[in-house]
Amino acid sequence: MAKSLHVLVTGSAGRIGRAVVRELKARGHFVRGLDLVATPDADESVVSDLADAAAVHRAAEGIDALIHLAATPDDDDFLTKLLPNNIVGAYHVLEAARLADVRRVVLASSGQVVWHQRFTGPLPIRADVQPTPRGWYAATKVFQEAAGRAFADAHGRSVIAARLGWCPRNKEHAEELAGTEWGPDVYLSPGDAGRFFALAAEAAADIRFAVVYAMSRPLREEVYDAGPARELVGYEPRDVWPQGIEDLG
């Protein structure tokens, strides 16, 4: 058990965010949430969007670790959705972390940044392969990873960029996953997501910058290399598709 941390979670009222807040609380950490709506179960809840730089900066004050989940989570209009939420938002979060001297930042990236590697192989896909983003959403995550690296190198902070698997947000999303041949192999359950991000917040301080994949156990084949997450933060997934979707109805 790591020492008790003060953790800021952005996007804390979303499906993954709620699971992360629950896991952090269960492990004895103080949790401040930041989202467009109040965050259930958080010790403190900041209601704001990422465009409000002052609110993001206030939310980061007194924080040991920052878990950045908030984003437009799919391909959408670039200028009105992806640019302000995923690009400018990431800038505000990293600037807030710099000014508040946050020592550990965990950035939620996506397996979509190496989308086309699935078709050219080999599997599992390593974290150091050339990015092959699926679209504009994935391109914003490539930017965020690069920004995290620049932040870590320039300011001596620790950054972990986590390329997440497919965590359905609703019943229709789960049906879409189930209808693909490969979806169950890149599934990420809320429970595993919560455990991963808690471990990433607690991980050894000597990690300067790392890219890892966070998935549940594959149903048939390992698509993304699970080794770095295991070795660096001690993450071992517990669930396998469809565990964790029961509450979607």
Image (cartoon, rainbow, N blue to C red):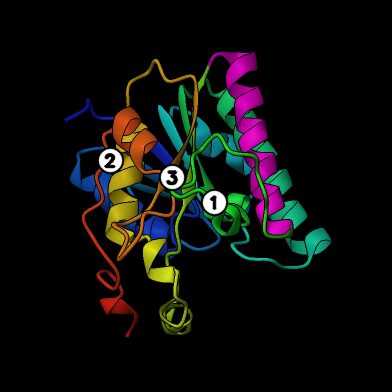
Task: Using the rendered image of the protein, determine whether residue 48 is visible from the camera's viewpoint.
Answer: no
Q: Which mark is residue 235?
A: 2
- Region rendered in magenta: 136-156
| Label 2 crowd (10 A; few <14 / some 14-19 / many >=20) | many
> Of marks 1 and 3, which one's residue comes earlier in the chain?
1
Indicate the secondary structure of the residue bearing disc 3: strand
Q: Residue 78 lies in magenta, yes or no?
A: no
Q: Which mark is residue 213?
A: 3
Name the residue: 83% across, 59% down: 79
Classify 61 as above or below 179. Answer: above
| Residue 15 picture location, percent across and down | 41, 64
Name the residue: 20% across, 41% down: 27
Q: CA distance from mark 1 to mark 2?
A: 24 Å
Classify 175 as above or below 197. Answer: below
Q: Residue 148 lies in magenta, yes or no?
A: yes
> Of marks 1 and 2, which one's residue comes earlier in the chain?
1
**Labels 1 and 2 touching (C-beta < 8 A):** no
